[in-house]
Image (cartoon, rainbow, N blue to C red):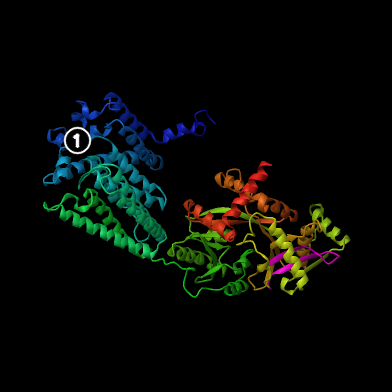
Amino acid sequence: MTEGSPSRRHPLVRLAARIPVTLVLVGVVLACGVVSRGLWHPLSASPLWDQVAYGLPAIAEGRWWTPVTGTFFSDPPWLYVVVISGFAGVAYLEYHRGSRVALGWFTAGQLVGVLCMLGFVALISQLSWPWAVAMAHSLDVGPSGGTMACIAASATAMSSPWRERVWFTVLGACAVLLLFWGTPADIVHAFAVLLVLAVQRPLPARRSTMRERRLLGFLAALAIATAQVLVFLSPTRGPFGSSAAGSAPLVNLVVDVLVIVLIARGLRRGRRWAWLVAVVLAAVNIAWAAVVAVGLQIPSLPEDLFGGDPTPTLGEAGLWAIFLGYLVWARAAFRAARRGTIGSSPAPTAADAAALLKAHGGGTLSWMTTWKHMSYLRTESGIVAYQRHAGVAIALSDPLGPPEGRAQSVTEFIAASERDGLVPCLFSAGEQTRRAVPSTWRSLVVADDTIVDLPGLNFRGNTWKPVRTSLNRAAREGMTFRLTRLVDEPWGVQAQVRVISQSWVGGKELPEMGFTLGTLEEARDPEVRLALAVSPQGDVDGFLSWLPIYGADGRVDGWTLDLMRRREHGFVPVMEYLIGSSALQFAAEGARIMSLSGAPLTHQYPPDAGVIAALSERLAETLEPVYGFRSLHRFKEKFHPRSETLYLLFREGSDLPRIGAGLVRAFLPDASLRQFADAGLELVRRDGG
């Protein structure tokens, strides 16, 4: 490999090689700033201003070159920071689309924006409109028309939904600047963006998702609130007149912003009530602006009749009108009502889920979908089991039903969740389900399912010595293994099992986890088998619970480990003994697999996993003293299982904070804030010791 090969260059050198046009343009702007001294002195106070600035006066006096020369200057000096920052959009476009495209859009956006601004100002200057007259006598400089066009064009290089979100931000910024400040540069920005909009037509049509329509409604509401705050804090000189900072009553601003934020949260979740309130509020603001506009034409009315400076009200009416139009256009996205389940009623039951499992089979975790606190969505081809927490619909494992209908079930679950304003995700899903979600979805490994193949299992050889030793020791000490059902055992055995479990739970700072980790209540299911280790004295030294894994033929194809509990000071290798004895009996019965289930946060990531691996490692270190996930995973390795990856499937990274909150509530529905705090103190105490 040669010294100058691209892969040996410094990253900054490789970046510079990808954006030469951007670097040249920035260099020219800075050079002009140095030559004109505009970097430290206002250019408008220099004789050079009249020679390079563009505007109607310059064209009227024959300075036809100013639309080009004005591109490479800025005024006042502090604005150079904003101007140079704007070239980031040019750099992004050039990096992803090439130098020719970036230069083309910069040139077209700048020249078309400036020329259209001149024509527009010349047209409106014929009216007796103070703002139009002021624009007709104004000069300006700056390359922001070209940089704004590149920012807009660069959105098309982004994947959906970021493409639509960037476009919304660009259009919103242009609207606010034009309505409240209305400088020549703001007019140039508007025409430059309209040029890109007309050529590329990037805005979403009816094919945009319900979620995106709700998100845009949410962002639009927050944009109006932000605009009101900015207008209150700074003076304006827009098309509707001028206003001083703080000219409107503060109490009105606070109330308006609080109401808008409340509505925005409802719009984000697609609530019908939020849409109705937003429509009414927009209509009221537009109507009030119309009243103010008429009142200002009546000289006999007192100036303070409208409660402060009325100028911002007229500009805000323009934003409310755009917002109202959007709400009417996207009204179908805001029909979610508050209710406990998604989908049509009546909802399926746990019995329906169990019947579907027995008819078509399921995965190693599928029986958990029949547990309490689960809700169900009936799809065209099956059932999706889920829990609803913190605004998130968390589907557990894979959809139930025939494998060929899995993709349809996933699609219907996503649509039903989004229709009710919930964030959809699938937890502990397998590889087939990962392939069934939309291609834009992301996945995160949450566990490795540990599976022991039972045919031919005999525990012979050195690799099985620890398991074989526990079985031999149990035989010498008179331990008895019994595979039974908890509901079939006498009261005395059930009482011992209950005491062992309560003792285990009592040693934790947090209560028993749920969702994918069962309790004795789930173990009482007649379909669940209980493995008991009984001492010669009749004491239960430990127990396991096994969940059925149904095959496609309706027969039990294997068993999944759920509860693992042992009596303190009992038979030491009781867990190895119980699992080994269970495996031998399951194999004798003709079962195909035995799943030791997945220990969360124990996945072995590749070296290039990056932030995902780092996050998992940190969480594992934090929770290990409380729940021992890693030590449990190491224990299961004694049985030499093969691994099948389990995933968390979600739309995008911005959903993860809400999904995380939902999973915490799913796993620890009964934990209090005090218990979380106590567990945290215990972690600190152990770490410091």
Which quarter of the figure has residue 640? bottom right
Q: Is residue 209 visible?
A: no
The amino acid beneath tag 1 is Leu
Drawn side of residue 176 relative to residue 427, left or right: left
Residue annotated with mark 1? 139
Q: Where is residue 432? Give x, y as percent.
A: 57, 61
Q: For the residue carrying disc 1, how many other residues have a C-alpha within 10 Å: few (<14), some (14-19), or many (20+)?
A: many
User: Which residue appears at 85% of the width and 59% of the height?
Assistant: 472
Q: Which sits in the foreground, 439 or 680?
A: 680
In this rendering, the answer to whether 468 lies above or below 29 is: below
* Secondary structure of residue under mark 1: loop
Q: Which sits in the foreground, 309 or 642?
A: 309
Magenta residues span 526-548
Q: Seen from this angle, which residue lies furthest right? A: 476
Q: Which sits in the foreground, 259 or 590?
A: 259
In this rendering, the answer to whether 486 lies above or below 502 is: below
Drawn side of residue 402 relative to residue 280, left or right: right
Drawn side of residue 68 relative to residue 636, left or right: left
